[in-house]
Image (cartoon, rainbow, N blue to C red):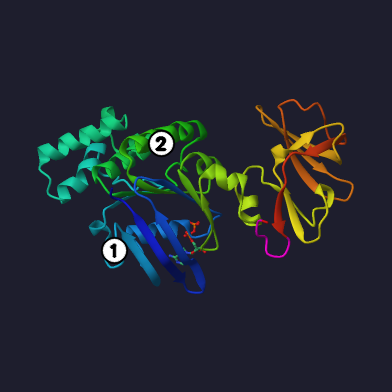
Amino acid sequence: MKGVIRLEELTRTYGRTVAVDGVDLEVRAGELLTLVGPSGSGKSTILRLIAGLDRPDAGRILLDGVDVATLPPHRRAVAMVFQDYALFPHLTVHGNLTFGLRVRRVRRADADRRARAAAERLGIADLLDRYPDQMSGGQRQRVALARALLRDPSVYLLDEPLASLDAPLRFATRADLLALHRELRTTTVHVTHDQHEAMTLGDRVVVLADGRIRQVGPPQQVYDAPADTFVAGFLGSPPMNLVPGGGVLGGDPTLTVGVRPEDLVRDDAGPVVATVEAVEALGSEAILLTRCPDGTRLTVRTGPRPGVGPGDEIRLRVDRRHLFDAADGRRR
Ligand code: ADP
């Protein structure tokens, strides 16, 4: 199977900023891999390096065993889709879809047929005569995806492809992307800073911070067993409660104790006493922002109608704790 990407000691610096810092990673054939991390953690740079839009300072990029570091983008079997679509504004959808094929000297009738097939697959066949400014963001993103399909690449690189879409459309397009990937099984590397996408859109997730990989694994596995306090605090919304020294969650000065908001459960016999400071009612659930007598703040996830308000005292039990080394933050 084609589409294996290997990054070895990949490094890219801009001036004094180390954007990508010795990244080792293998993307498996047919896998959908998601890169997540805060803004500036190096996600886009990794994607651009794989695409050939940027050059590494050190390290290797292997595509199916071949070092592509010196190949220009069009010689790499990759197709990149950007957040801002990057469509030609003066060309119709048809023109945008056939442009690359024509450059590659595909015959007009053949290019037409393939463009139409790609458009149909993405549900935009009735838009072939429109210009980009005559379409919604979602439609433009579909055109960009259809154009990527037409390159028939070994690897898709998606840079925040859903970020410009509003929430309902994002939801629908995410489902479409997943369906498309299941059908094509083409290796895909996808960048996002969105929690939801990180959890749902990928066989594995790579968590980055400061240009370095913190953890790689299936999303649920990373969520259930974060490798360090950074990953624990980054993946999950609201984030995990982290208490240095354990405090109200069970004291041990050598540890930082973590508890996910859903693992703090209202229980009149529970050992933790906390005062509600605010309630965020989210429709399907509510988030309680609480404070313990020693000043520790705890976020609690509850059902939609918790029946408490600011100033009320509640008791909590701790269903699951995560233990991290207080000194280096690593999972114990
Ligand atoms: P992310 O995609 O995770 O937001 P980037 O890969 O875009 O992060 O950026 C990583 C770091 O490299 C950031 O500190 C950013 O400011 C810096 N950087 C990225 N591209 C350039 C560039 N062309 N020139 C200078 N600094 C850059």
- Residues in magenta? 326-331
Query: What is the quadrant of residue 309 in the picture?
Result: top right
The front one of 49 and 5 is 5
Q: The residue tagged with tag 1: helix, strand or loop?
A: loop
| Main SS of residues in magenta | loop
Say which residue appears at 85% left-offset and 50% top-offset: 295
- Give the class, few, some or many, for how many residues have Cα within 10 Å of label 2's Cα (few <14, many ≥20): some
SS for dot 2: helix
Q: Dot 2 corresponds to which residue?
A: 178
Horizontal side of 118 relative to 54 (left or right) equals left
Which residue is outermost to the bottom?
A: 16
Q: Nearer the viewer, residue 35 or 135?
A: 35
Quadrant in the picture for residue 94: top left
Identify the amino acid type marked 2: Leu
Mark 1 surroundings within 10 Å by alpha-carbon count, few (fewer than 14), some (14 through 19), many (20 or more):
many
Q: Which residue is mark 1?
A: 68
Q: Is residue 237 above or below residue 302?
A: below
Amino acid at circle 1: Val
Residue 268 is situated, as x and y percent measured from the top left of the image, at 86, 31
- Quarter of the image with the C terminus in it: bottom right
Asked if 157 appears above or below 166 in the picture, the reply is below
**x and y, in percent, of residue 19 in the image:** 48, 65
Q: Which mark is residue 12?
A: none
Q: In the rendered image of this protein, does residue 192 appear above or below residue 110?
A: below
In the picture provided, is 205 more to the left or to the right than 257?
Answer: left
Q: Residue 60 magenta-drawn?
A: no
Relative placement, left or right, of 264 versus 284 is right
How many numbered discs, if any? 2
At 36% from the left and 36% from the top, the residue drawn is: 182
